[in-house]
Image (tube, coloured by chain):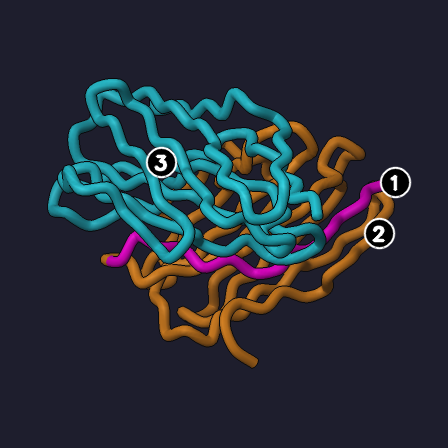
Amino acid sequence: ETGVTQTPRHLVMGMTNKKSLKCEQHLGHNAMYWYKQSAKKPLELMFVYSLEERVENNSVPSRFSPECPNSSHLFLHLHTLQPEDSALYLCASSQEWSAVQYFGPGTRLLVL
Amino acid sequence: AQTVTQSQPEMSVQEAETVTLSCTYDTSENNYYLFWYKQPPSRQMILVIRQEAYKQQNATENRFSVNFQKAAKSFSLKISDSQLGDTAMYFCAFMKLGNYGGSQGNLIFGKGTKLSVKP
């Protein structure tokens, strides 16, 4: 595997379910990001991890819980989501000094 | 707060012709990066081109070039010799630099322009 991978690619869940999104980067980067991409809205940065420590949390509801166990892996734990949380969730990584972020293919989430 | 505006929700161009996508941004920062990202249908976002604000020379990557007007806060993307594979959403993005030159990771995106290249 090369680049940034995300699993699952598609996810349908009920509002009472708990699920997790996984992101893995194979680029040797030390910063990772979660973005939300909704229809007709700009991409929204949700969380930033640098050297496995969270450095940004853009007022994201607590039903989204990130986890970064090491510099290669990033998770987004989901619980009691709302239908408006349906979106494409993108993971990205960067070598912090480079500023260029490399994106994964995304997880298309549908909350029923 | 920084904002990025892409005023063209959709555009189309004939294959082999040239098209320009517009982007304006608002910031009080002096040190920042600007980007164009491309997101093909059902495929992942990839970087097209990057511009450092301190550089006066416009960035170029093969058929892709930018017109960076810092005073006007304008950052347009020109695609020459358009190809069918250029069909995608194009996003303009802004990132400010940290105090010591390192990035802070906060990419601010525009809403995107959907470009269709017609045969």
Q: Is residue A104 magenta?
A: yes
Query: Of the residues shown, which amino acid type is indicated by label 2?
Result: Val
Residues at marks 2 and 1, common chain?
yes
Determine the colour of chain A: orange
Report the residue marked by disc 1. Answer: A112
Amino acid marked by disc 3: Phe
Does residue A14 appear to the left or right of B35 in the view shown? right
- Give me the disc on residue B94: 3
- Image mark 3: chain: B
Span highlighted in magenta in the image: A98-112
Residue A52, placed above or below residue B67: below
Q: Are marks 2 and 1 in contact (CB under 8 Å)?
A: yes
Mark 1, secondary structure of its residue: loop
Q: Colour of chain B?
A: cyan
Is residue A76 shown to the viewer in this render?
no
Q: CA distance from mark 2 to mark 1?
A: 7 Å
